[in-house]
Image (cartoon, rainbow, N blue to C red):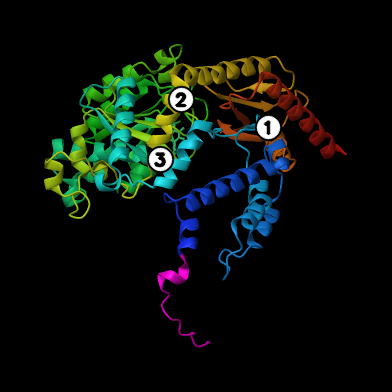
Amino acid sequence: MTTAVARKPVPQEELGPDLLERLFVCPSEKSQASFQAAISTALKALEGSAAWQKKPYSGASPEVVRKAITAMDPCPEEGRGLEAVMKDVREAILQHSVWVSHPATVAHLHCPTLVPALAAETLISATNQSMDSWDQAPAATVVEQQVVKWLGKLAGFGAGSDGVFTSGGTLSNFMGLLLARNHFCQEKLNWDVQQEGLPLESHRLRILCSQKAHFSVVQAAALLGLGESAVVAVESDERHRLDPQALARYLEVMRYERLLPFAVVATAGTTDFGSIDPLPAISELARKHGAWLHVDAAYGGALLLSERFRDRLQGLSLADSVTIDFHKLFYQPVSCGAFLVRDGALFRNIKLNVDYLNPEDEEEAGVDNLVTKSVQTTRRFDALKVFVSLQSLGRRTLASLVEYTVDLTSDVADLISATPELELAGKPELNAVVFRYRPSRVKSQERLDQLNASIRDVLWNRGMAVVGRTRVNGVRYLKFTLLNPRTTRAHVAGLLEDVRRIGRELEEANHG
Ligand SMILES: *Cc1c(COP(=O)(O)O)cnc(C)c1O
């Protein structure tokens, strides 16, 4: 061990006012010049990454990516200056990032970002408001509440509704089930979970959702101390929608078995197929059995913007709580989601007051400290990017983007149906089209599975396309999630040709 060099405290003058102005965003010319230069250096790194922009991915292997990045010391003793750092960022990091706005990036619900939202991101970070308390985010608090109010109204909720921004669907689903559990235990078991922990009856609590519900439902059950086995997966129909008759049967049996089905989760836009569960029928059953209805509209919620597609969400207004993500079909930078609850007063079931943050007397005086409605403390002002995007584009333009992609997906499905050697898994509901390479000459299911997995790998390794995958009844499929309004039918037709060509290459390689 070396003896530590005793270092003197550094007086502020030694740091230098010049350095401090260049380092922090503040209202001086030097600071602003430094800020502008930094942003333009970042933009140059982005633009300079030409290879990256031409392909959806560099195709680099995990080893190459790791090597490029681990070669850099995360914390050198002396700084190297932003220009030099950005050059490395471009070469080691941007170079091997997935280019979300490339027309062939079609794997996930992973969207390109709107430029107005990026402008807002700059302000979000520069002003660094923290949404937990009014005294850290006065105007921001009002903006978030305005956006939440607008969204609640769009969802068909009444004046008593409320909500909060979250990091995304996972957290919003967790909050829905958290409120549902606490509400149920309070009302039906006269038990305050927030105070007392789980009631004795907790092993009888059940959550029902379809087999195609997002895995975060099961995760939430585990986090809530109910265990994954508290989630009962109800059968879905051939279009992957929850079957209300099956739901009715489960609920009846549960009543008989003295189980406590406290929540039903319906999905409006499943991750794999975009299927929308029949909300009105599900809501009726939930109500009849005294269960909370949470609708996971993380993905499909954006249809509310569209006059043409809004009807598909009929029944959403009957939910007790709703998840909507902005970092999917609202084209916002990650992360950005919302949680809505029909009766805002129910936030009291997760309420915590802390003297230094949201003292009760302040709330009684009408000061909003949003931490009271959230399970996060420090929280970004993500509402600003949604606000700025909605304002700059307007609902109609945003709706057109969504509509274009849904129409494109349905065109692509027709194209796949008409293409030899390709098999469509089913008619798409929103943006996801699931299909596989299936030439009639290949008879073995196992071989078909291998071929489809390999096609996806080849597309990735050559940096040609970022394509999704899934299994349907155990069989491997490829998936295009067509969220990107820049993707055209011609792009996808080209990609389908690539799939077939690679499929044939792989077949030949195997025979040769
Ligand atoms: C994306 C998605 C989620 C998860 O949301 P995150 O924002 O990734 O946390 C949950 N449910 C559905 C239906 C989704 O599409």
Tell me what residue is drawn at x 15 percent, y 42 percent.
363
Label 1 near ligand 1 (CB < 8 Å): no
Q: Position of residue 61 (x, y in %)?
A: 70, 50
SS class, disc 2: helix
Is 120 left or right of 47, judged from the image as shown?
left
Of the numbered discs 3 and 2, the one sitting upstream in the chain is 3
Amino acid on which disc 1 is placed: Gln
Q: Percent from the top left, x then y, of residue 338?
A: 36, 34
Vertical side of 199 occupied by 251: above or below: above
**CA–CA distance between discs 3 and 1?**
34 Å
Q: Nearer the viewer, mark 3 or mark 2?
A: 2
Quarter holding ligand 1: top left
> How far across and down, in percent of the image, does residue 135 sit?
25, 47
The amino acid on which the numbered mark 2 sits, given as a three-letter code, is Ser
The alpha-carbon separation of the residues under discs 3 and 2 comes to 28 Å
| Residue 463 visible, this angle | yes
- Local secondary structure at mark 3: helix
Q: Say the numbered circle drawn on residue 392.
A: 2
**Position in image of residue 151 (x %, y %):** 34, 25
- Disc 1 versus disc 2: nearer the observer: 2
Q: Residues within 10 Å of mark 3 (few under 14, many from 20)?
A: many
Residue underneath mark 1: 445
Closer to us: 316 or 157: 157
| Mark 3 beta carbon near ligand 1 (under 8 Å) | yes
Q: Amino acid at mark 3?
A: Thr
Mark 1 burial class by Cα count in 10 Å: few <14, some 14-19, many 20+: few
Q: Name the magenta segment's main secondary structure.
A: loop
